[in-house]
Amino acid sequence: MTLKKNILALRQKKAIVEKGGGDKAIEKQVAMGKLTARERILTLLDEKSFHEYDLFVEHEERNFGMEGKDLPGDGVITGTGTINGNPVCIYAQDFTVMGGSLGLKHARKITKIMDHALKMKVPCIGINDSGGARIQEGIGALAGYGEIFYRNTMASGVIPQISVILGPCAGGAVYSPALTDFVFVVENISKMFITGPNVIETVLGEKISQEDLGGARVHAEITGNAHFYALSELECLDQIKELISLIPHSNQQKAQRIEPKEPKFHKHIENIIPSDPKQPYDVREVIYALVDDSKFLEVHELWAANIVIGFGRMNGETIGFVANQPLYLAGVLDCDASDKAARFILFCDAFNIPIVTLEDMPGYLPGVDQEHAGVIRHGAKVLYAYSEATVPKITVILRKAYGGGYIAMNSRHLGADFMLAWPGAEIAVMGPEGAANIIFRKEIMEAEDEDAMRQQKVQEYIEKFANPYVAASKGYIDAVIEPSETRGLLLHALELSQNKDDYRPAKKHGVPPF
Amino acid sequence: MQIDKQELVDFAVTARKYKTLLTTKYKNRKTWSNPSPYEIQSYIPGTILEIFVKEGEVVNEGSPLLILEAMKMQNRIEMPFTAKISKINVEVGVRVPKDCLMIELEAID
């Protein structure tokens, strides 16, 4: 009989703590259009898969009236579970408990589950909804943040780390998401900034709303701090499920393979790209035409739209795609596009995901703002990331590959394993107009009709150099292929590189141009 | 995706112009202009605490022009070279944004 009594007592105890901040606080949370921390975890994880850890952890603060104050779970729910059968570690800050503020014990619950994730080699998901440091705990809260950041760094490149911003995430707290691999935000709910609107107004006199300063859209489109943007929490949780099924559990594994499917995209691949190199198209259509089931999960969809990155499957296996996007800014590389591509390449390399690069780029974005923003330093990250990557690296040149951009976009010279080009590809040191202007400057200047001579020389240059055959004659391109052969050749290349072995000199770590 | 031809703009990269769309961030970027040495601008937003000069006055290089308080620091703004103060656009106590044209100078013969 005693055991039964104990069981009942446990159930009672659990029920109290599981209520979090209580009915009133939950009402407030719901009124803000938010799910509770527990609902978020239960919605994200497979049914009945959640196992909670440290439900009965209590804070130890004795100052500032904290003695005897009950904070259920110390404001954070932690545990393990599965998403579509994939094991994960997870924590969710509970805004209903003292604003989800982070005290030392709250942080220790998080670091414990992070340590667990790193040891078990499973992804770690953090749901952020917190007013920030628990001021009453003073330096204890700071220590807590620091210990989380340290673990984020230790786990980087070992297990995938995902941050979900479902509420405020301000001050030091933003650095944990910034250190993780993917950040998810939701319109009207996510707020991220180092210093909030109040401080900015007091110190600098600049008036700005929370939404305009660090709302979801700002981070998804302007800063690039967020990788995925959703209009509702449920859409956001669905995005996480999709991502989790596409990436491996750790750097020691490959992503789960599923049954291959043929692409179902309706447009024929030969009809996507206009023959006039000045006309745009949506490069995502080329990706749809190549990937299994025409399914592509785009990362950073809104930020630096001049380059497209994301995951699709080929022969059932996860592939990382990097593609210049002529639809935006003519597909140039600039500071943001370089950062976007470089970090994605590093992620794919760390987690054994082959990289397919689709190239159609006119060069780097000209402008004082770009040069002064350090496009040299940013652009170098792309060179570094491609050169360092040892996963299978395949490039298909769709149309233009000019100058520095040709080198940067996973060229043979940076270690590409397979270099393919469509027959209309222009691989040259620069665009024909620019090149003709320089090479034939004298002839053009001395001609009676300068324009006619320029046109003639441009045409000459196009015929002689703006094609894939010069590069092919030197072996920089392995094959010039018909667009309709692309998927078949990619599948073959990926199959051939299953056991790719590539070595890098031993080092502690490189010194990339951050 | 259907591309709306109306929205496409000419976008020059080297000698060729491409038809393309612009991103919001690109549209909102600050275009660069050559700074004039005769314009004293605030390099940080702040509050004017004190002004030491008057319009029409000739001021020597290195002399203080004003105190701009920002981030709890009192920044002494000095005359970059000897010149005449042609116009003062700020008053003591006003809060100025970044890149605000505070004082205009005029060359002396």
Image (cartoon, coloured by chain):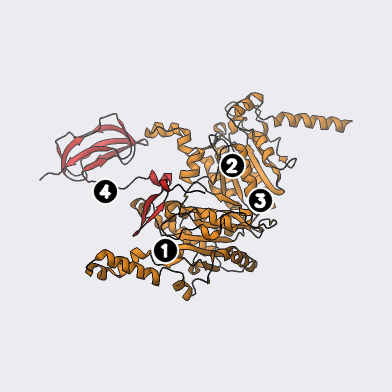
Chain colours: A orange, B red
Dot 4 and dot 1 within a common chain = no
Q: Which residue is identified by label 1?
A: A404
Q: Nearer the viewer, mark 1 or mark 2?
A: 1
Between A394 and A64, the one nearer to me in the picture: A394
Say which amino acid is labelled 1: Gly
Q: Label 3 neighbourhood size at 10 Å, few (<14), some (14-19), many (20+)?
A: some
Dot 4: element? loop
Instruction: Tell which residue pokes out farthest to the left in this image.
Output: B109
Q: Which residue is identified by label 2?
A: A164
Q: Is residue A347 visible in this depiction of the protein? A: no
Chain for disc number 3: A
Left or right: residue A309 versus residue A77 is left
Work out how far the residue at label 3 is from the one at label 4, CA to CA, in angstroms.
Answer: 52 Å
* Residue B89, horizontal then vertical, whole percent: 23, 33
* Residue A136, horizontal then vertical, whole percent: 56, 31
Q: Which residue is identified by label 3?
A: A245
Q: Which residue is identified by label 4?
A: B34
